Amino acid sequence: MGRNDRKRRTPMATKAIAASAALALGGAGLLWAQMNASAHESNSSGQNQTKAAAAQVATIACPDVGQQLTNVPQQARQGVATELANLDKQITEAYARLASTRQAQANDASFVQNAIVGPLKEKRAATIDRIRIDIQRVGGSVNAAALKQLAACTTQTATNTTTAGGQNNNGGQNNNNGGQNNGNTAAPSASASASAPAANNGGQAGNGPTAADFVDITKVAPNVQAKPQKQAQASTGSFTTRCGVNANKNHNTDNVIVAPGVTNGAHHEHDYVGNQKVNAFSTNDSLLAAPSSCQNQSDLSAYYWPVVRVQDGSQEFDANALGGGKEGNVGKILTPQSAQIKYVGSPASKVVAMPQFLRIITGDAKTLTNGLANANAHWSCTGFENKVQLTEQYPICPQGSNVVRTFAFQSCWDGVNIDSANHRTHVAFADPASGVCGNGFKAIPQLTMRLVYKITPPTIQNGVVKNAYAVDGFPEQLHKASTDHDDFISVTKNNLAAKIANCINTGKKCQ
């Protein structure tokens, strides 16, 4: 989830803060983009104001506090989760203000810093301090100084733009870093003043995707690596559960794993299959009592992922709602043509049954902020899946081929915890070369998912993408392909978890 490499000028103070925070927290996930250079120039002449208008910021970059909190006591986790959701809401609100004040930004080179980024830091500092208090109140320890450094946010400037047409002009041709930065230019939201001069970031709602976010898959060199060789103790079976494609349109913008008890905690719509009563207020007991869309009614697991939309101007049911149009997620929601959910084994060992209520998130919804360390997006086209998988761009598929999203969840478990403070450290991926679980972790059935969509291929003309499609996401993440992610809560009855493990361990193909 790598960030902007095209740094023009970063103030020394900002660099020092970033360095100290990275050292204090191990450096993981702290990505700092430069501020708009013109906002730091002492000369406030009209010439510099013109520079500000020509190099407007694209988005707001804030350190992902939640990913740094790996040791939060259980008694403090609900309070911390609520405050982390408050941080997400603050960023969303600041991004909306960024997108709707283009005229003010053009007139005042210091507007973004003084009116948006500065106040955001103050709000974040207060929220982060409440997180510290929550942790310390129950006897937990936290590096308060390092945590405090995470309050400051920066901005990513707009480059590779034209001033007319509201689109970038690189046509996706100069996308040497997979579309992560090229063409990431700012644009007003749907509510922005039409008279405001806009840097441009493409997309129906002004926050992506751009032409650089798409690639003709027939022009991508094969990149799929061979799987590890199966060892003598390999578990070679599989278990397929058929849970539908969410044809009943079970959607919400909650995320009970990362933001329990918080409405609109995800800030984007999810498709739900399997358990049909998943929302911010779900509990283990309520999940056990809920109906399931799976043919095997012993599978009450929650399988959910961000929706895919075609930005065709359609006004969906959430066009004027939070998590939908109000947060830049616009266009027609697509229902997958097919959704395959399969559990597979380990090439190196037998597997143990998944524990009840195990929670796993794969991928990262904030790659534009966090970098690609936890990215697990895989985009391809039917007929190309064994040759090409994309993480940082959406594929343009040839005629007769459909778009495919695939996910392979973490397949190693620490053997103790069903969740962790940052929702990552209790599970891990096996070694890609050997398939072996490290650090004493145990192999569990690996959840895999394959979603197929029939999408009219986007076209790019003069740097403008038409019929763009994109995965829902946080508005400041600009609908990048790399932000795709998937969520899972294991909920079974009638000893189904053990049956799945046994099927896999004995080499059977079950369903």
Image (tube, rainbow, N blue to C red):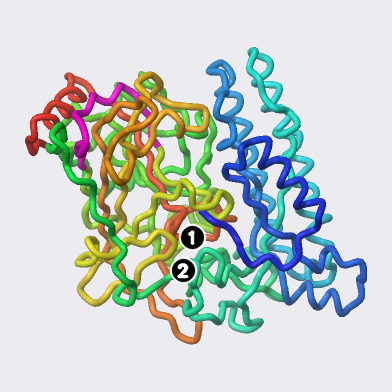
Report the front residue among 33 and 221: 221
Report the front residue among 63 and 309: 63
Q: How far apart in space, not on screen, are marks 2 and 1 (Cα)?
A: 7 Å
| Percent of width and height locating residue 58 | 65, 64
Q: Residue at x 22, y 28 (%)?
A: 351
Q: Which residue is drawn at 53% across and 39% down?
A: 265
Residue at disc 2, secondary structure: helix
Locate residue 286 relative to residue 425 in the image: left or right: left
- Magenta part of the protein: which range? 342-360
Magenta span contains residue 348:
yes
Residue 435, compared with residue 75, is above or below; it is below
- Tell which circle, 2 or 1, labels the residue nearer the N-terminal end: 2
Residue 30, compared with residue 37, is above or below; it is above
Classed neighbour count for the residue bearing mark 1: other residues with Cα under 10 Å, few (<14), some (14–19), many (≥20): many
Residue 363 can be seen, yes or no: yes
Magenta span contains residue 86:
no
Q: Name the residue under label 1.
A: 480
Q: Residue at x 67, y 24 (%)?
A: 142
Res. 157 image quadrant? bottom right
Q: Do the residues labelled 2 and 1 touch (CB within 8 Å)?
A: yes
Task: Assign the magenta stretch its main secondary structure.
Answer: loop
Residue 241, compared with residue 307, is above or below; it is above
Locate residue 427 relative to residue 301 in the image: left or right: right
Q: Residue 213 carries which label?
A: 2
| Percent of width and height locating residue 424 | 45, 34
Report the front residue among 40 and 266: 40
| Percent of width and height locating residue 214 | 42, 71
